Image: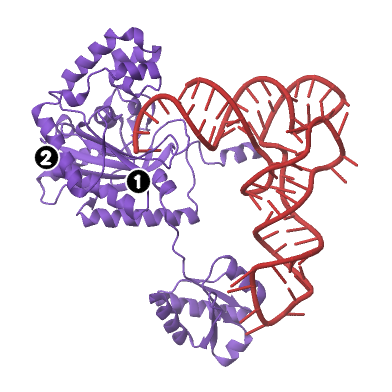
Amino acid sequence: MNKDQLKKGLTAIKGTRDILPEEAQLWQIVEAMAKSIFELYAYRELRAPVIEPTELFEKGTGASSDIVTKEMYTFNDKGGRSVTLRPEYTPSVVRAIIEHRLDLQGFPLRFYYIGPMFRYDRPQKGRYRQFHQIDVEVFGEKDPAVDAEIVEMAHRLLNKLGVGNVMTLVNSVGCKSCRPTYGQALRKVALESLDKLCPDCQRKAELNPLRIFDCKLETCQKTASTFPLITDFLCAECREHFEKFLSYLDFYGISYKIEPTLVRGLDYYTKTAFEIVTGDLGSQNAICGGGRYDDMVKEFGGPELCGIGFAMGLERLLSVAKISPARKNFVYFAYMGEEAKKESLRVARYLRSKGIECLVEFKDRGLKAHFSRANKIGANWVLIIGEDELSQGKLQIKDMVTSKQHQGTAEELARILTDKRSQ
RNA sequence: GUGAGUGUAGCUCAAGGGUUAGAGUACCGGACUGUGGAUCCGGUGGUUGGGGGUUCGAAUCCCCUCACUCACCCCA
């Protein structure tokens, strides 16, 4: 490999990116907030592998979904198994539940997870090939109250992050018994009005007539507005579930918009489907999406166990969250001379044992350069160790914000620092 | 997968067929040798994304390719 190739290969691959320390701080804040909120609802973390058998997503996510048909990172491992970098999290949780018979155990089947997902899309604003999701799943709760619970939980997190300009879209996509009836009715009408549809939608009429509702063309929209809606086809059970779900949202004071044409790209949803969108993003405006999937566990050969969950996109969340990094407090060591360097190491070791963050850089500098450096990297305190300090056995510490300077032994300074920190 | 736009110093950008590709900022050093943020001076830093072509001459024009950005699509 020559230098050019080396240089070329030394960039992050398309659709992936580095999260540098400054930004990583924000990620840590968001992740910590999410975790603490989910734990408030007694959700527990469940970590599954990044890599799974390809079949898991073909069966779970759906063989006809876009995600499975064209967006998966799939390859054969050295044992000849077809494996896939997970494009979403739900199938993994379902697999874990069945594999470990979690349904037979006592703890609540309420899970969350934060981690990377992979989809081979064309990257654009708010869309990456490796992206991160906050994922929440609940199993074994039929009650529509839980549908509202997770929506409320999502809102709590969004509120805490200062995300404004959001809209919650809700719908019911029916169940095994009522959805096919609707599908047939819709396809029939769509096929009857083929001449009023654009070529794209003519294809959709046969393949997936629901998508016609999404067409941007005015003529198609006008035609589609005469089409039947799922809401009119729901069976009694689904209708009741949907109405109760909405009444719980009202109970929580969450405003929403019923969007009868909302269908999600994953094949497995039943009854409740929802999406939270923001006006502060570009065209990739969904920051949260989820719904109920009452048949998936059974279809995987597991017990009769309903499920519901949502996923939030961390990159999108971060781009609209109003948070600022907490200022990191640390002590910068300004030492002069070899002996002072050693003393710095001793003092730093002591202060760290007291829980005080210390930075000793191994570079000879004049005092002025030390201060300039400390200021540059945002140190709150500068600890000075030079000839005078060594001979007097006292250290000096300067508060970089107030410019006040204190003198004392390491023990005395540690007390000052911990006092200030707890304020 | 389709379409459009953009690639010049670590970052933000100039130079629009004509010397040795510049500036601000950042970084290092000095003015200032025990006290930061300011000012002034100097220095490091570039195969102009990569490859090919046109031309006496290309950062500039053409083709290919890669990457980024935005949109379609899809979705978080």
| Disc on res. A142 | 2
Q: Of all residues shown, which one is farthest toward the bottom? A: A392
Instruction: Tell me the element at label 2.
Output: loop
Q: In this view, does A102 lie above or below A356?
A: above
Occupied quadrant, residue A69: top left
The answer to whether marks 2 and 1 mark residues whose Cβ atoms lie closer than 8 Å is no
Q: Can residue A284 be seen in this view?
A: yes
| Residue A420 drawn at (x, y percent) | 43, 78
Q: Which amino acid does label 1 sit on?
A: Gly
Colour chain B is painted in: red
Q: Can residue A98 be seen in this view?
A: no
Occupied quadrant, residue A247: top left
Q: In this view, does A225 lie to the left or right of A70?
A: left
Q: Is residue A9 above or below residue A370?
A: above
Q: What residue type is labelled 2?
A: Lys
Colour chain A is painted in: purple
Q: Which colour scheme is used?
A: by chain
Q: Name the residue under label 1.
A: A115
Q: Is residue A40 above or below residue A333?
A: above
Residue closest to the eye, A260 or B32 = A260
**Are the residues under marks 2 and 1 on the same chain?**
yes
